Amino acid sequence: MDIVNKIINRLGQDSDFFRYKMMLSNEPVLLLGYQSFMSVAESINVLHAQAARVDPSEHDGHRSRLKDSIGQIIEDPSEDLIVSLLLRGQLVIWFESEDAFVDFHPYSKVLSRSIDAPVTENVLRGSISAFVEDMETNIGLIRKQAASEDLRTQSYGLGPDRQKQIVLIYMQNLVIPNLLESIVNRIESNIGMNVQNLQQLSAVLGFSKWSTITKFNTTELPQEVERALQKGKVVILLDRFPFALIVPSLLTDMFAVENDRNFLIVFTYLTRLLRILGVLTNIIIPGLYVSLVSINPDMLRIEIALTIARSRMDVPYPSLVETLLLLLILELIFEASIRLPRSIGPTLTMVGGIILGQAVVSAKLVSNLLIIVLAATTISSSTVVGFHNSLSIRLFKYLILVLSALFGLYGLVAGMVVICAYMASLNSFGIPYVHIMKSRGDANG
């Protein structure tokens, strides 16, 4: 009774929390739970139906069989354990005569959306089932996609009250042992840290918060998870987060997706080459424009140099300022396209981009050539796999831009060397960022 009173004092101020006394097969019981998680009336009907299967005329062991028939008996009940079950949506039944608790899975309300097509990743040829917010559904999707007896899961409760669930998924015979051991040690050593977003999860895993390159990839496609598992990687599922997190993140993940393998191998490699060219274009082209216009115009043919000079004849700013001005406008358009409602977002950003681009050229604030350069830069930034990777690429181009404005082509080359050296210095749990991991479960790699 003391535990029941403590739970009621602890949770009773919440109007969503209910206590309901009733008779269950002639036994007085108290139901504890949250109304928002379950249909109380339907759950009570299920309880009565399950209790009716136990013959009350057999007095010996009747109470024990009754508890076993409706749920799982809580062997060592404690206040924290029962509160944890309640917060996960379970219905706890207290048998007053024996002071015993039973964990009952109620008739739950549907609090998650159904499986749908992916929103952030387009699939041309392949499965279009995407992850949802429900953890069990996501694990089921992965099991159905991988279909292997070697698939293993490890679940942890994070946070001060251990209510934020996190699940590690890996292939027992393929996973890199040191990688799995390092992740488990980091989670167990930071088990009390609260995790509500990916920045907090990065802190739990020990990643630097100032890193400009993500240490894990995010995907909403089960087939991408299967590909990562076959390479020996570890997949992390976070409660109420409709994406799978793949550790470690490598440079090759920017250019390769599992959907590529559904096409002829020639097109697979050509597509990946196109993505590499897109990344290089996004990083290099703005800096190359500034360096050739302001520092090294002698590197151009005389006809091209004269054409550029005519296009910038009335522009009052240096090439660096006009480039930064237009890049800022493009970043604002990017952000607006994400925040605006879907019904008006594409129309508004397209019209705004066309009108704004035409206006700044007519006002002689930027040159015509710069519009072409930055249009190519913007398009190429979307060729990389994963929006999180495109953010890193978009950031690197500003470093190249500033160095090119200061030192010309020498600064551009120096910037590329700095970026390559920075990428080479990164690692996740001892695995270098530039490492190439081939599929360990596929002979073709």
Image (cartoon, rainbow, N blue to C red):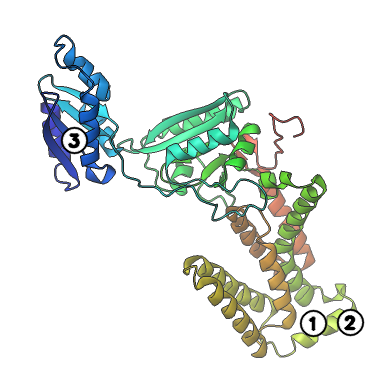
> Which amino acid does the dot numbered 2 rest on?
Glu
User: Where is 350 relative to 315, above or below?
Assistant: above
Pointers 1 and 3 in contact (CB under 8 A)? no
Q: Residue at x 61, y 55 (%)?
A: 122
Q: Residue at x 30, y 32 (%)?
A: 105
Q: Is mark 1 on a helix, strand or loop?
A: helix
Q: Which mark is on residue 336?
A: none
Choose top left, top right, bottom left or bottom right for residue 289. bottom right
> Which amino acid does the dot numbered 3 rest on?
Leu
Q: Residue at x 72, y 69 (%)?
A: 376
User: Where is 130 relative to 283, above or below?
Assistant: above
Q: Name the residue under label 1.
A: 308
The x, y position of residue 393, in whole percent, is 64, 58
The x, y position of residue 405, in whole percent, is 71, 71
What is the quadrant of the C terminus in the image?
top right
Question: Who comes first in sequence, dot 2 or dot 1?
Answer: 2
Q: Name the residue under label 2.
A: 303
What is the quadrant of the N terminus in the image?
top left
| Residue closer to the observer: 5 or 314 | 5
Q: Which mark is on residue 32?
A: 3
Alpha carbon separation for disc pair 2 and 1: 9 Å
The x, y position of residue 96, in whole percent, is 11, 24
Q: What element carries label 3?
A: strand
Give neighbour class at mark 1: few <14, some 14-19, many 20+ (Cα, 10 Å).
Answer: some
Query: In the rendered image, is residue 429 in sight?
Result: no
Q: What element carries label 2?
A: helix
Pointers 2 and 1 in contact (CB under 8 A)? no
> Which amino acid does the dot numbered 1 rest on?
Ile
> Is 312 positioned to the left or the right of 34 in the image?
right
> Is 76 positioned to the left or the right of 425 in the image?
left
The x, y position of residue 305, in whole percent, is 84, 80
